[in-house]
Image (tube, rainbow, N blue to C red):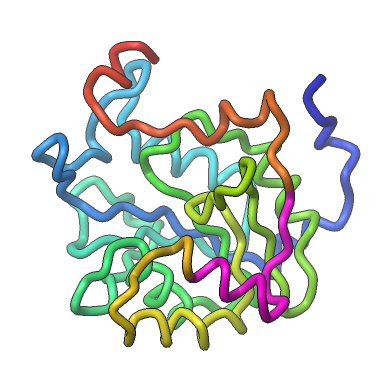
Amino acid sequence: MPRDFSSLLGFARSDVTAVLLSGGESRRMGTDKATFLFRGTPLWQVQLETLQKLESKEIFVSARFDPPWRPDRVVFVADVQPSRGPLSGLAASMNRMTTGHLLALAVDMPWMSKNYLEFLCAQIAPGCGVLPKIGDRAEPLAAIYPREAAIEIGKALASPDFSLQSLTYDLLAVGKLRVTPVTGQEKEFFRNINELSDLESA
């Protein structure tokens, strides 16, 4: 049975900034993945609508360049240069946010549930975010980071290792993230769009 997220308390909307991570051109698809249709709706719109339902204090779109599809009411945050993928988006968003926590969501994860994100938000604490894990693998592109994680994110950008898996390991080691295991039925939320065939089977 799936967890009942509706009974959870402590969703501190005023302390959360949400960022949609949209890197721009997809190497596999050759164009902006965010514009591909998922059940008739562009991926970017699906994901922004999910984030808007959370009623967080701020919503950002992070990318290398300001995407033409970005709604005026959503703030564009340019990746920290040189662009290192999602890591640069996290760094840039940390620099702009006015809250204590940053909820990151990838544009290519359209099965993500608003209720599940609320479940994650219910687990944040001062100085500590939450990281879903499927087995031994972290899911850093649907996670919440505390403002204090900016230190480790900055170090990662200055190192030759831009892996978010490595970053989350470091943040767990210093107590700035806590793990929440992903249950069997919740794994569906973390499916992502890697190939056109993934859209065709959606």
Q: Is residue 171 magenta?
A: yes
Q: Residue at x 25, y 17 (%)?
A: 197
Q: Compare residues 201 and 24 and report the one nearer the observer.
A: 201
Residue 68 at x, y = what percent?
Answer: 18, 50
Q: On the picture, is 158 further left or further right than 146?
A: left
Viewport quadrant of the C terminus: top left
Viewport quadrant of the N terminus: top right
The residue furthest top is 201
Q: On the picture, is 188 further left or further right than 91?
A: right
Q: On the picture, is 82 further left or further right than 74?
A: left
**As displayed, is residue 61 above or below residue 7?**
below
Q: Compare residues 68 and 127 and report the one nearer the observer.
A: 127
Q: Residue at x 57, y 26 (%)?
A: 188
Q: Is residue 96 magenta?
A: no
Q: Residue at x 19, y 77 (%)?
A: 82
Q: Give the extent of the magenta segment.
A: 167-180
**As displayed, is residue 157 above or below residue 17?**
below
